[in-house]
Amino acid sequence: QQQVKQSPQSLIVQKGGISIINCAYENTAFDYFPWYQQFPGKGPALLIAIRPDVSEKKEGRFTISFNKSAKQFSLHIMDSQPGDSATYFCAASGGSQGNLIFGKGTKLSVKP
Amino acid sequence: EPEVTQTPSHQVTQMGQEVILRCVPISNHLYFYWYRQILGQKVEFLVSFYNNEISEKSEIFDDQFSVERPDGSNFTLKIRSTKLEDSAMYFCASRGQGRQTGELFFGEGSRLTVL
């Protein structure tokens, strides 16, 4: 019940295209759903996050769509750029300590 | 911009040796975490620490692991007797007070190689 399932494992997109990564969770106690971006050799860095009281959040080219009833959330990257090439992790947390449970990651490659 | 700093960036050790990984969390943060990432795999939770004690730990965090906040700034992870399978990137993270959930700020990691 603590798992966060992420797909696809890898994604290749042309420059200017839309990248879509999906995640699903089971634990209804989760109340915070961030997406982290990780470049090789670096630590994960927060990209965008959402709480279940809204169904969508947009920051620049990045949008989270959240479906509470389906227990799913997704990251959309509009106008994908080669600089977006990285590994993206969805995560979820809830409870008293805020521990993040990560998905397995999606390696995104944006081709010029 | 405040950041989480970790040392060393890379440590190579022999199997069975003790290793201490060090972290300096963001200064006004109250919640501290260690995660690990085996090469090419997902980021796995090890332990969370709040108010000078462990608040939660995963099944990975067995008796070989310990954490300590020896002073007001450092947060350490000790592995008593390293095994080959401990080879991974270890990330420290911290979080401020306020809501029970929120952004975790990660350091750049310490790469541990056990030979």
Image (cartoon, coloured by chain):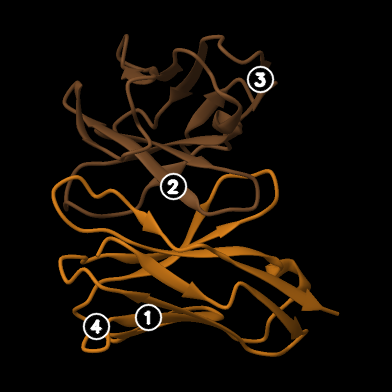
Mark 1 element type: strand
Query: How far apart, in angstroms, are the residues tagged by discs 1 and 4?
Result: 11 Å
Q: What amino acid is labelled 4 in the image?
A: Val
Classify residue A43 by image quadrant: top right
Q: Are marks 1 and 4 in contact (CB under 8 Å)?
A: no
Q: What amino acid is labelled 3 in the image?
A: Gln
Q: Is residue A92 above or below residue B97?
A: below
From the top left corner, tell me how far across and down residue B60 is, in percent. Answer: 38, 37
Q: Is residue B44 above or below residue A105?
A: above
Q: What amino acid is labelled 1 in the image?
A: Phe
Estimate how packed mark 1 is, as few (under 14), some (14 to 19) or many (20 or more) residues with alpha carbons within 10 Å. Answer: many
**From the viewer's perspective, is B57 left or right of B74?**
left
Residue of label 2: B44
Same chain under badges 3 and 2? The reply is yes
Q: Is residue A63 visible?
A: no
Q: Residue at x 74, y 73 (%)?
A: A109
A33, B42: nearer the viewer? B42
- Letter of the chain that mark 2 sits on in the rendering: B
Q: Tag count in the figure?
A: 4
The chain whose colour is brown is B
Residue of label 1: A73
Residue of label 3: B11
Same chain under badges 4 and 3? The reply is no
Q: Residue at x 24, y 65 (%)?
A: A1
Residue of label 4: A54
Q: Residue at x 47, y 72 (%)?
A: A6
The hue of chain A in the figure is: orange
Q: What amino acid is labelled 2 in the image?
A: Glu
Mark 4 element type: loop
A49, B48: nearer the viewer? B48
